[in-house]
Image: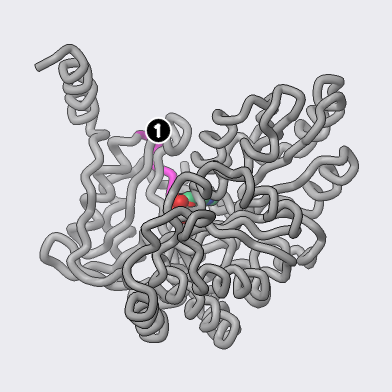
Amino acid sequence: MGSLERLLSEELGALRDSGQYKQANELQAPQGPRTRMDGRDVICLSSNNYLGLANHPAVIEAGIAGVKRYGLGTASVRFICGTMTCHRDLERKICEFVGCPAATTYISCWDANVAIIPTLASTPEDAIFSDALNHASIIDAIRLSKARRFIYRHGDLDELARMLDSPDARSARNKLVITDGVFSMEGDVADLPRLKQLADRHDATLIVDESHATGVLGATGRGTAEHFGVLGEGTIQTSTLGKALGGACGGYVAGSQVVCDYLVQKSRPQLFSNALPPAVCTGSMAAIDVLMADGAALLSRLRANVSHFRRGVEELGLRTLPGITPIVPVIVGETATAIQMQRALFEQGVFVSGFGFPVVPRGEARLRCQISAAHTREDLEVALRALAVVAERFPAARET
Ligand SMILES: Cc1ncc(COP(=O)(O)O)c(C=O)c1O
């Protein structure tokens, strides 16, 4: 074994010894509110399939039609010969859904973030302002930029205001304020109106990552801006097609024509990586169509399920964070506790993922429960009963 392998083996051993070694959880059935893992049927509380569209018949049919019409893939990046009619159709559909002049797609929202941030803020004369709990893709995107960095404490917009006011920030050329719309590990919602106000006051551009808000927040599922009644007020958004909108993969930037044109010319993940597979384009379009046609019913089921589950978690006395979104964390402290509780819940027929450092801050390991419109009341009741049984064995999960 070479010295690199020796070092890696030691680190892997340390993860195993401290109970932090992650095992991939293999699904033996489609993604759904109930699925099959390790030979048993389980209720799934760990999926981003918020509207149950990952396995929707119209989405599947549209995906199959996409493969039949265009083949499996583009065998090219967008600007050489990887742009097919389905990519243009999808981008028009995203514009119609989001209500913006232009959109451009990427192979993932990770790529959309890694595309937009270093491209719009590329030089040391630029400045980026980012919430400390923004998604890892935003953190890595910032690392790829040469801009000055200002990281404000999670949700602390007074600190952001002070940073924007500092002489170093005032002298910057392009200023980007970046936030998750819904924070992926906390489930809370960014204060978009105030962020927009601060950005406007300092001639900064606000970018909102709507990955956990698209199809979830707002009267018709258009996300954080719709939730706050500020839809169409000039923010740029990134989002994913890999969660509520069919759950396949793919991401997009939606905003002004000039920003999207610039990204198409300059952003490296689109210039140097294959375009979205056609089946993902056609399947995702079908998912957006379902949301635009049946959104009211889906969203009202999702919200009723979220309220029911949140109330149940509170009644069990578990440590959670208040909120309105389908991300319901149960904070348990140590990473090893989260992993042990995940195993104990699985024994009870419920799959819910435990997360520890570095995904969440040290000492704040948690079970992240995620609720879908596709869960039945019975699914949620079974899950709550399982949580009650397991919490008896792990007092760290209870409010003190
Ligand atoms: C807030 C946020 N942004 C971006 C991503 C990445 O999305 P994708 O899976 O499309 O790369 C995620 C996925 O977990 C996310 O939660």
Residue 301 in view of the camera: yes
Q: Is residue 258 left or right of residue 320?
A: right
Please state which of residues 306 and 173 is positioned toward the viewer in this rendering.
Answer: 173
**Which quarter of the picture shows residue 53?**
bottom left
- Please provide percent x and percent y for residue 245: 49, 70
Q: Quadrant of the N terminus?
A: top left
Residue drawn at (28%, 68%) of the image: 43
Residue drawn at (40%, 33%) of the image: 357
- Main SS category, magenta section: strand
| Residue at the outermost right position | 201
Q: Is residue 180 left or right of residue 375?
A: right
Region rendered in magenta: 329-334
**Which quarter of the picture shows residue 170?**
top right
Residue 317 in view of the camera: no
- Please provide percent x and percent y for residue 204: 81, 41
Residue drawn at (40%, 39%) of the image: 365
Q: Which residue is mark 1?
A: 357
**Which quarter of the picture shows residue 91?**
bottom right
Q: Is residue 58 left or right of residue 6?
A: right
Q: Is 257 included in the stretch rendered in magenta?
A: no
Q: Is 331 included in the stretch rendered in magenta?
A: yes
Q: Is residue 6 left or right of residue 312?
A: left
| Residue at the outermost front position | 80
The residue under label 1 is which amino acid type? Phe
- 294 w.r.t. 238: above or below: below
- 89 w.r.t. 104: above or below: below
